[in-house]
Amino acid sequence: MAELVRSFDWAQTPVGPIEDWPELLLNTVNTLLSSRQPMFLWWGTDLIQFYNDAYCPCIGADKHPSALGQRGSDCWSEIWDVIGPLIENVMTNGEAYWSEDQLIPIYRDGKLVDVYWTFSYSPVWDVAGNVCGTLVVCSDTTGRILAEKAVITERSRLLEVLRQAPAFFALLQGPEHVITIVNSLYLRLVNHRDVVGKPVRVALPEAAEQGYVEILDRVYQGEPYVGYAARYDVYAGEGVPPDERYLDFVYQPLRESDDTISGIIVLGVDVTDRKRAQDVLLQTEKLAAVGRLASSIAHEINNPLESVTNLLYLAQQTAVDPLTRQYLTTAEMELRRMSSITSQTLRFHRQRTSPAPAQPGILLENALSIYQGRLVNSRIETSTRIRPSRPVVCFDGEIRQVLNNLVGNAIDAMAGSGGRLTLRSREGTDWVSGAGGIVFTVADTGSGMSPETVKRIFEPFFTTKGLSGTGLGLWISHDIVQRHHGKLKVKSTSKQGQSGTVFTLFLPFRSDGAKDT
């Protein structure tokens, strides 16, 4: 550019030949040409242009070298409405101007392109205090701005990908594990609480109570952690039981370019449904094995029971002593009860192919008769009210099994302390479906159950009887009732002086789903 300036015919411009230039212009142009910072000079009222080598890439081939010695308004016609007033203010009022990363499009390669500039416009003063020109010191920041925009765009895209990812994600920063980024699945996991910007210990106190913060502390020291079907009880509200969740997840240290750890990446999936399905499958497999075993045992016991029953019958016929005859009668009743239990077990696996009419009163009386011996021995009073009703179409063996189970549980609840067993049957209506049917009630004055126990009472293998219970009776009973399109409900209280449990069984007159008329 120094050579171009020296060889340029300045006599053809308002500036005149170099030998006539004022010392201020010479010094300013020499300073400009010597600088490696892009610099540009508008001189005089016509704003004749000078610039250095560093400015050439900024101006582009469309304007270089023709911009040298050209009037400003002619050279920058595409942006003069933007920069013209700025330059005029410098030349007229001597006020400097500075701007950072300002978008000012210019012509490059034959087309108007967006260019970002950081620049200053400074007045050039002579000794008399007059502004003789405007000196421009600038940088083309387009590359940096576009790179930053690309980073922002990619970051936004990454966040959008994480938002839509089929896994929960969170980014924790610093040794306090401050939650800085989360996606929608993570918010769903924590029940949509406001957690961003808070340490895990503050945002999710239940996580700290369950030992997860200690795990995060170890991960922050560089030790990744992977959890499989890990239980996490999520806070669901004041006075509300927590949500039991199971998670597959990873805690991964976030390493910076210098290998220091600045945070932790949290990524995982909620596998609660899978865990529950696996548990159900496991329970189903257990139940199938238990059913096969029970059926086999019942079959093996049934034959000797018949033989013993026959022998007792013969002994009764030949017994002379009344007391002996009474003992034999009691033994026969107990054997009959055992035979009924084994028969019910077999019927659970070998049921008739279609339901048949059964008298509700007879079903309830049979359930009561089986337990007469235990009722007497347990000092339990019985109150029965069986109202006449039409038959109910059902698998009578299964319904007997349900009623036997309810009566047996009621007796167990009052064992050792005595009490009162209430049995009722009446016609009723399921107000949801509109079906008519029979309502059986089995109530006891036992110790009752807690709300937590009542919630789980129909789960397989859940029992309140310790080693003496299998936890299958009520689960099987509930399943039988559902297959009959009925309902089995329970209410219980353990309040002192008011304790007891009431089971209500509703069976539609027809269990095949047909509307009762």
Image: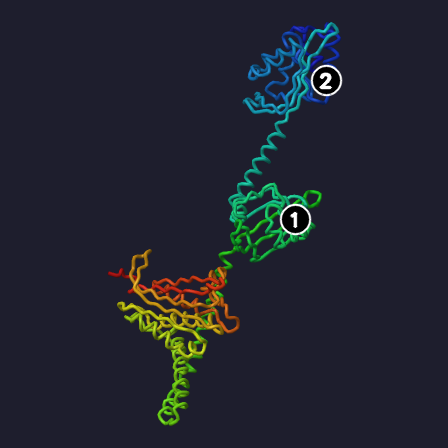
Q: In which quarter of the image is residue 368?
A: bottom left
Residue indicated by mark 1? 253
What's the residue type where badge 1 is placed? Pro
Q: Residue at left 60%, top 36%?
A: 151
The quadrant of the image that shows the N terminus is top right
Residue 206: % across, % down: 59, 51
Residue indicated by mark 2? 33
Viewer-nearest residue: 134 or 271 = 271
Residue 289: in sight, yes or no? no
Q: Few, some or many C-alpha atoms within 10 Å of disc 2 (few <14, some 14-19, many ≥20)? A: many
Q: Dot 2 lies on which element?
A: helix
Residue 462: % across, % down: 49, 66
Q: How many angstroms separate mark 1 from mark 2 (CA)?
A: 52 Å
Q: In which quarter of the image is residue 356?
A: bottom left
Q: Quadrant of residue 36?
A: top right
Residue 502: % across, % down: 41, 64
The quadrant of the image that shows the C terminus is bottom left
What's the residue type where badge 2 is placed? Leu
Q: Residue at left 74%, top 9%?
A: 24
